[in-house]
Amino acid sequence: MMLLRSALFNLLFYANLITLMILGLPTLLMTRHAVFSLARIWAKSSLWLLKVICGTSVEFRGVQNIPEGGYIIAPKHQSIWETFALCLYFPDFSFIIKRELTWIPVFGWYLKKAEQIAINRSSGSAALSEASQRSREILAAGRQLFIFPEGTRRPVGAPPVYKFGVAHIYTQANAQCLPVALNSGLFWPRRSFLRLPGTILVEFLEPIPPGLDRGTFFNLLQDRMEQATNKLIDESVRANPKLSELLNPTAG
C-alpha cells in the first residue's frame, strides 16, 4: 500500500508542478512576486497531496523566531521537501543554485524571473566571489537568502559536513542568520521513491545576530542546528521506532 501511495503522490506531485508552470506563464510578464505567489501555491498544494495521499503532515515550530527584512536562512538539507515547503514562510527569497538549473525549459524561466542566484560551481573561487557579491545585494535589498550549509542533501542521521561558504557570506554581508532544523529525511528520504506517513518536524531556531567572527559563527551554527535536528529526529523515532531503519550515522 505504501508503494502505491508513494507512486500516486509522485505522479501527482510532478503533474501539479507542470500544470502550475503552464497555467502560470503569464506571471513571467509580471514582477518576481507573482512567481513567488505561484511557488507558494505549489508548496501548499504539494503539502496537501502529501498529507491526503501518504498521510504525511508537517508541524512548523518557532515561527515567532522568523525576523523581518533581509537575513540568511540556513536550513538542514535532507530531502527535496525543504526546497519547496519552507518557501511558505518567506516573502521575497533567493536561493543560491547551480546555473544548470536555469537551463531547464520553462522551470528555468521561473528561476530567472524570481531573481535567484545562479552560479557556475566549476569556477571554484570565482563562484564563491560571485555568490558573495550577489548575496550582499539580495540582503541589502531586504530579501531573504537561502543557503544550505552542507551544500547538498545528506542522509538523515549522517555526520554533518558543513561548508564555510555560509560563514563567508555571513561575515561579508554582516547579516543575521536564521538556522532551521528539520527531520524531513525520515519521511521523504533522499534518492528514494517512498513517502512515509507521519509528521515532518521543522523548527525555526533563534536567529544568530550579525557581527560574529567567521569561526565563531560557523561553530555556533553547526552546534545549534545539529542539536536541534537530532532532537527532532529522536522525537519522531520514539513515536515510530520503525523510522530508525532510515538512520545512517556512518554515511559520508
Image (cartoon, helix red, strand yellow):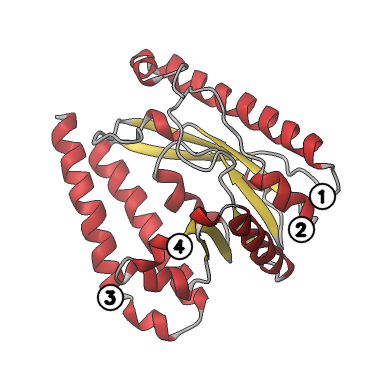
Q: Distance between the residues labelled 2 and 3?
A: 37 Å
Mark 4 residue crowding within 10 angstroms, few (<14) / some (14–19) / many (20+):
some
Q: Which numbered marker is on residue 173?
A: 2
Q: Residue furthest bottom?
A: 29
Pointers 1 and 3 in contact (CB under 8 A)?
Answer: no
The one of 4 and 169 positioned closer to us in this rendering: 169
Pointers 2 and 3 in contact (CB under 8 A)?
Answer: no
Residue 24 placement, left or right of 129: left
> Residue 145, percent across and down?
62, 58
Q: Which residue is drawn at 41% across and 19% down?
A: 247
The image quadrant where one finds the N terminus is top left
Q: How far apart are marks 1 and 2 (CA)?
A: 9 Å
How many numbered circles does the render carry? 4
In the image, which is nearer the foreground, mark 2 or mark 4? Answer: 4
Q: Name the residue under label 4.
A: 99
In the image, which is nearer the foreground, mark 2 or mark 3? Answer: 2
Sooner in the amino-acid sequence: mark 1 or mark 2: 2
Sooner in the amino-acid sequence: mark 2 or mark 4: 4
> Residue 153, percent across and down?
45, 38
Pointers 1 and 2 in contact (CB under 8 A)?
Answer: no
Residue 24 placement, left or right of 163: left
Q: Residue at x 23, y 36 (%)?
A: 193
Q: Which numbered marker is on residue 210?
A: 1
The quarter holding residue 207 reads top right
Q: Mark 3 points at which residue?
A: 23
Sooner in the amino-acid sequence: mark 1 or mark 3: 3
Type of amino acid under label 3: Leu
Mark 2 residue crowding within 10 angstroms, few (<14) / some (14–19) / many (20+):
many
Type of amino acid under label 4: Arg
Q: Distance between the residues labelled 2 and 4?
A: 22 Å
Sooner in the amino-acid sequence: mark 2 or mark 3: 3
Secondary structure category for the residue under label 4: helix
